[in-house]
Structures are given as C-alpha cells and as structure tokens.
Amino acid sequence: MSDDVQARIATAVNSADVLLFMKGTPLFPQCGFSSRAIAILDHLGVEYATVDVLQDPAIRTGIKEFSDWPTIPQLYVKGEFVGGSDIMMEMYEAGELLDLLDQNGIAHA
C-alpha cells in the first residue's frame, strides 16, 4: 500500500468517532454484511460516518492491509479497529458494543 493511501485511510479513521468502511452507502448498502453493520449502528442510535470502498479501489484494498483484517465492512471507534460485521454482531448481542461506546464517551440512543 502506498504512503498516500495509508495517509488517506488514517485521516478517514481519525475524522470521526465512529467510522464504518463499507460497500455502498447507509441508504444503499451493496452487501449483506455492510447492511447488517449499518442496522446495528442505526439500532444503537449512534452518529457515524462511512467510507464507500467501492468508490476507490485503492482504499478497498488498502483498508485490509491497514487493519490486517481481510474483509469489509470494518468498524473503527475513536481511531481503533473494532472488527467486521460478525464481531459487531457478537459484541452487540453481548452488550459489549454499547459498553465500548460508553467507555469512549460516544452518545447513543
């Protein structure tokens, strides 16, 4: 991954308290896993930003190396990688995702 792509990803990761790299947009997710991730965040009532990796092949490839995680979507909270949709679902069901938001002072419903 080029330094430029790494810098662009790092800037995005640090630009929002909650950031989801996904396929598509919140209103039109382009895969079931991205749709599930959006549903979880919407259900929690948290403000979040997204990056549509389908709009930039360099970001789509680079984010996997940046996080050392092979799949998309990818959730970041306060600049820290949390996981993909399966981990989000497990954390949500266990109450851990809500705890993570609380620990980081992120407002939610």
Image: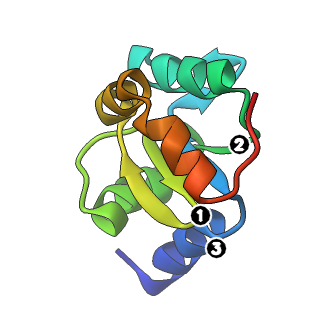
The amino acid type, in three-letter code, at marker 3 is: Thr
Q: Residues within 10 Å of mark 2 (few under 14, many from 20)?
A: some
Decide which of tag 3 and tag 1 comes sooner along the chain. Answer: 3
Compared to 88, does 40 lie above or below?
Answer: above
At which x and y percent is residue 87?
Answer: 31, 35
The amino acid type, in three-letter code, at marker 2 is: Tyr
Element type where label 2 sits in the image: loop
At which x and y percent is residue 40?
Answer: 54, 22
The amino acid type, in three-letter code, at marker 1 is: Lys
Decide which of tag 2 and tag 3 comes sooner along the chain. Answer: 3
Q: How many marks?
A: 3
Q: Can see residue 53?
A: no
- Give me the disc on residue 11: 3
Q: Can see residue 72?
A: yes
Decide which of tag 2 and tag 1 comes sooner along the chain. Answer: 2
For marks 2 and 1, give the CA distance: 11 Å
For the C terminus, give its image quadrant: top right
For marks 2 and 3, give the CA distance: 15 Å
At which x and y percent is residue 49?
Answer: 71, 45
What residue sits 73% from the left and 27% below the top?
Answer: 45
Query: Quick one: 95 or 82, which is closer to the camera?
Result: 95
Query: Quick one: 2 or 44, which is closer to the camera?
Result: 44
Element type where label 1 sits in the image: loop
Element type where label 3 sits in the image: helix
What residue sits 51% from the left and 54% below the top?
Answer: 76
User: Residue 43 sits in which quadrant?
Assistant: top right
What residue sits 29% from the left and 41% below the top?
Answer: 71
| Residue of label 2 | 48
* Nearer to us: label 2 or label 3: 2
